[in-house]
Image (cartoon, rainbow, N blue to C red):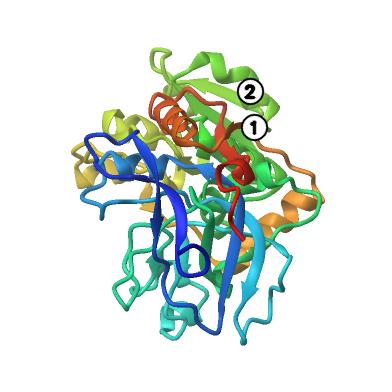
Amino acid sequence: MGYPDQFEGFMVNSTEKWSEFKKQEFKPKPFEDRDIDIKIDCCGVCGSDVHSITGGWGDVPLPLCVGHEVIGKAVKVGDKVTTVKVGDRVGVGAQIAACLECKICKSDNENYCPHKVDTYGAPYPDGTIAQGGYSSHIRAHEYFTFPIPKNISSEDAAPMMCAGLTVWSPLVRAHVGPGKKVAIVGIGGLGHFALLWASALGAEVYAVSHSPNKEKDALALGAKHFICTKDKDWAKPWAFTFDFMLNSADMTNTFNIQEYMSTLAINGEFHNVGLPDEPLPQMMAQDFAPNGCKMGGSHIGNRPEMLAMLKLASEKEIKPYVQTLDISEAGCKEAVERVKTNDVRYRFTLTNFEKAFPDRK
């Protein structure tokens, strides 16, 4: 049948065979007045994709097309769309819809809307399951569709749609900037963006990693200091130091969290954006008492934050570390397997969609 009634994507049919992708057709949600159809040019590969298709975060609807770091061209816009026109290069991140009517949405917190729809694996009100960006097209509400500045390449813009925003939002909500000492834990897909953003915002930035071989990259990305957690008593010299510690690692379940918390300044925050499959280590309420610290977390970011992030990246010509792979059954398999084993520096973007979907409109 084909577009616009059917889209085509590389889909997983079993969490046991999570890296076996098959090109299949799927039915998108009905097109509405504020919707935009996007012909996809590239899509980032996120750790969330792996957590989802492996079942690490729980059951998912199958078959499933993942991918929520989408860049492409608008090929159809609804009658009430005002922010995008046909032909515009746009991006879509990890959220594709919200009610936009509740007090949460109206306070620019639509990323926490109880009626939000994730970009893949989530049901729309009509029961249609949202499918992601390892596909020919995506249908998105205009509020969750973002113009991409001309001087940011599509390959670089793709991982900004989720990884970039996921660390940008907590940094700016914590008022990170000049005079603040900020520690970034975990120098991977999320963490390398956090180093770039925190540095660009003017903070004094520290990289915290168990991998000493990442020191050179961390300093190049904007860290002023590198702290290796493999060193004995690594935390002691940094007691009461950091105003904000952003944890982008997804192995927090293996951490001695009390060590990390001891490095926080009075009322400092240990903030989680890395989401491991396993529960966090057991803690005592008393662990928060020595420095009055707190622990928090967050979910992606809102539209104003996305637009501000892209504006800063454009103005300061910030460039993430991105590797590309052609999208195909083999390319998707390689991408998710290498993300699973951290064999990437530091994000993958799937490209060459024209070759994979030669007959699309």
Depth check: give the residue in front, 330 or 112.
330
Residue in the picture at 66% in, 42% down: 155
Residue hosting label 1: 321
Can the viewer see residue 233 in this picture?
Answer: yes
Picture coordinates of residue 276 (x, y %)? 31, 39
Q: Are marks 1 and 2 in contact (CB under 8 Å)?
A: yes
Q: Is residue 22 left or right of residue 143?
A: left
Q: Secondary structure at mark 2?
A: helix
Q: Amino acid at mark 2?
A: Asp
Q: Nearer the viewer, residue 182 or 170?
A: 170
* As drawn, 247 above or below 90: above
Whether residue 241 is visible to the viewer of this picture, yes or no, is no
Judging depth in this view, the residue of 73 and 210 nearest the camera is 73
Q: Residue at x 61, y 87 (%)?
A: 80
Mark 1 or 2, nearer chain start: 2
For the C terminus, the quadrant is: bottom right
Q: Quadrant of residue 253?
A: top left
Q: Is residue 29 above or below residue 81?
A: above
Q: Residue at x 69, y 73 (%)?
A: 84
Q: Residues within 10 Å of mark 2 (few under 14, many from 20)?
A: some
Q: Which residue is mark 2?
A: 217
Alpha carbons under labels 1 and 2: distance apart: 10 Å
Please rate how many residues cluster around mark 1, counting C-alpha atoms within 10 Å: few if below 14, some from 14 to 19, many from 20: some
Q: Amino acid at mark 1?
A: Tyr
